[in-house]
């Protein structure tokens, strides 16, 4: 959290700390009670991985995620290197069979969309990792996609 506080206009409440919850999992916790209406964090936009939706939409965001999250040198990108995200596309076939009949039923849609709609070819290992990190950390919603 230090690097956010050291960024111009960045702020994380001083009671916050990062705790590891297990392999590949962590969370931000308050060490002491926080006053009502206190600002918990301010993350400057220049630290966020964003892309204008009118400039090739999620495909552009996916490419930017590859550059920023996989190849980037920001403290956040460096921290993400300890994670090994995977989607069922990378699981062995017998493990994927356990998903048969479970909602949402389209576990392979992200990689299919990325390869067919954006790349027009098979994704490299770095491209897959960037896309997985984008999906895992994405804040979009169906309401947003529908203009809500």
Image: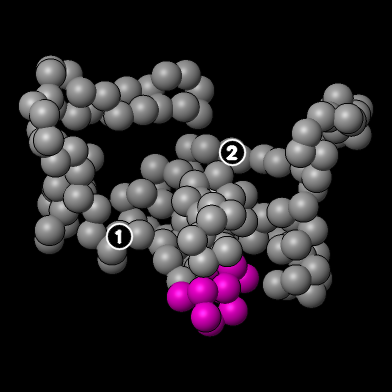
The residue nearer to you, when weighing 126 against 85, is 85
Number of dots carrying numbers: 2
What residue would you read off at disc 1?
47
Quarter of the image for residue 124 reads: bottom right
Region of the chain picked out in magenta, as a range? 52-62
SS for tag 1?
A: helix
Q: Mark 2 and mark 1: span between their CA atoms?
A: 22 Å
Mark 2 is surrounded, within 10 Å at the Cα level, by few (under 14), some (14 to 19) or many (20 or more) other residues, namely few
- Report whether residue 66 is seen: no
Query: In the image, 86: left or right of 102?
Result: left
The residue nearer to you, when weighing 113 against 54, is 54
Residue at x-position 42% and y-position 19%: 21
Query: In the image, 106: left or right of 114?
Result: right
Query: In the image, 5: left or right of 68?
Result: left
Image location (x, y in percent) of residue 115 = 76, 65
* Residue found at the far bottom of this picture: 55
The colour scheme of the drawn protein is: one colour
Q: Quadrant of the N terminus?
A: top left
Residue at x-position 46% and y-position 75%: 52
Query: In the image, 48: left or right of 32?
Result: right
Residue 58 drawn in magenta? yes
Image location (x, y in percent) of residue 43 = 24, 53
Mark 1 is surrounded, within 10 Å at the Cα level, by few (under 14), some (14 to 19) or many (20 or more) other residues, namely some
Image location (x, y in percent) of residue 32 = 12, 17
What residue would you read off at disc 2?
84
């Amino acid at each position: 959290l230090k690097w956010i506080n050291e960024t111009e206009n960045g702020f994380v409440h001083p009671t916050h700390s990062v705790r590891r919850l297990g392999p590949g999992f962590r969370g931000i916790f308050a060490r002491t009670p926080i006053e009502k209406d206190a600002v918990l964090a301010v993350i400057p936009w220049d630290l966020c991985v964003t892309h204008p939706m009118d400039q090739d939409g999620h495909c552009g965001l996916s490419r930017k995620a590859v550059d920023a999250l996989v190849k980037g040198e920001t403290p956040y990108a460096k921290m993400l290197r300890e994670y090994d995200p995977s989607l069922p596309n990378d699981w062995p076939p017998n493990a994927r069979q356990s998903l048969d009949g479970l909602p949402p039923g389209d576990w392979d849609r992200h990689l299919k969309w990325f390869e067919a709609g954006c790349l027009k070819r098979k994704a490299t290992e770095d491209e897959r990792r960037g896309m997985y990190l984008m999906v895992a950390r994405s804040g979009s919603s169906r309401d947003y996609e529908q203009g809500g």
